[in-house]
Image: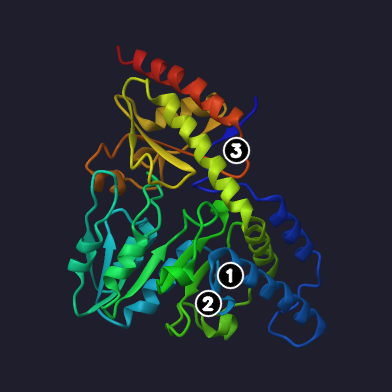
Amino acid sequence: MTRHYLDHASTSPLRPEARRALVDALGAEGGDPGRLHAEGLEARVRLETAREQVAGLLGARPREVVLTSGATESITAACWGAAGRGDHQVLTAVEHSAVTAAAGRHGEVTVVGVDGLGRVDPDAVRAALRPDTSVVHVQWGNHEVGTTQPVAAVVEAVRDHPALVHVDAAQAVGHVPVAFRELGADLLSVSGHKWGAPAGTGVLLVRRGLRLDPLLVGGDQERARRAGLEPVAALAGVGAAAAALTGPALAAEEAEARRLTDRVLDGVVDLDGVRVHGDPVERLPHLVCLGVDDVEPQAVLLGLDRAGVACHSGSACSSESLEPSPTLAAMGVDALRSLRVSVGWSTTDADVDALLGALPEVLAGLRALRR
């Protein structure tokens, strides 16, 4: 059976450019990039090339790029580093659990609500600030429903306050243009594996001139901002993936992703008991979330999987959490039954065709069992 992978928002297959760079680096001598011998210098060149490639994709200076093991580490490092500035952090009600869990370890947290589309009001963020607020967290685009946040307006709303602004861009990078310097945020976290870079790679952008206490200590790697020997081969892969998307390629992939997910939205509009969660227009191009009445999402996912289609649900019974989706609950919709469809660099029309062909049959079969 031909498989159709529509879960790129969870993780995306390794891009060919990243694979080639990774394999090439694995074939090298593997020196420590902090050493002055030839092997170390070769590794340093690979590492700094990757840093420049990532900076080019993100509209940042290379010196602002801290290479990490993924968005979870980057987010935790942002929360840790900002915590010394105050005992209070602000975040939106739809942030990823990596943000909510890390922020909750550093004093009091104020959660700012969202509207029915999952979008926060920058004025509400401003109103949540206190004299002891150390950092405001806002995601670029939601990981379940795809709604994009007014990140520039949030940055502007906090500008006159000493609090830092951290943007979780794990779902955005590699799918929409990101210009860190133009945005004016202080911190921005990135995951590599969600846009075709190797798993175990990530980035924390730290605004020029900002000093943070490092989360990982014990060495001077990453300009003393993240201790530990760098995984040069994997980071060469993330650099190559970034380079592959810098310039017109990103715009082309963004347009293709939106075309494919628009096909999904058009294809389910007449299905009984199926609705769209989140903003259908102001959204990440590669992700849509559907609410499904009357049937448990796990059964839908298993039915689609049997038909060769891989999707995901943000609900309790089909994810690691035992709780309903906080994102959907914050939006005031059914937090137990959802279907997330996400495309990526390798998605084709045949993949969307397979979903649109299988979903009505799966839903009809499951509903027939209830009679």
Q: Residue at x 61, y 28 (%)?
A: 350
Write down the residue under mark 1: 55
Contact (CB < 8 A) between labels 3 and 1?
no
Instruction: Determine the secondary structure under disc 2.
Output: helix
Name the amino acid, label 2: Glu
Q: Is residue 173 above or below residue 333?
A: below
- Choose the circle earlier in sequence order: 2 or 1: 1
**Residue 113, x across and y down, in percent:** 22, 55
Q: Residue at x 67, y 56 (%)?
A: 244
- Choose the circle earlier in sequence order: 3 or 1: 1
Name the amino acid, label 1: Ala
Dot in front, 3 or 1: 1
**Residue 100, x across and y down, in percent:** 32, 61
Instruction: Determine the secondary structure under disc 3.
Output: loop
Name the amino acid, label 3: Thr
Write down the residue under mark 3: 347
Write down the residue under mark 2: 64
- The residues bearing labels 2 and 1 have C-alpha atoms spaced at a distance of 8 Å
- The residues bearing labels 3 and 2 have C-alpha atoms spaced at a distance of 32 Å
Name the image quarter holding the C terminus: top left
Left or right: where does residue 333 sit relative to residue 147? Answer: left
Left or right: where does residue 334 sit relative to residue 201? Answer: left
Q: Residue at x 66, y 69 (%)?
A: 50
Instruction: Determine the secondary structure under disc 1.
Output: helix
Left or right: where does residue 66 sit relative to residue 280? Answer: right
Instruction: Give neighbour class at mark 2: few <14, some 14-19, many 20+ (Cα, 10 Å).
Output: many
Name the image quarter holding the N terminus: top right
Q: Is residue 368 above or below residue 88?
A: above
**Residue 221, x across and y down, in percent:** 59, 82
Contact (CB < 8 A) between labels 2 and 1?
yes
- The residues bearing labels 3 and 1 have C-alpha atoms spaced at a distance of 26 Å
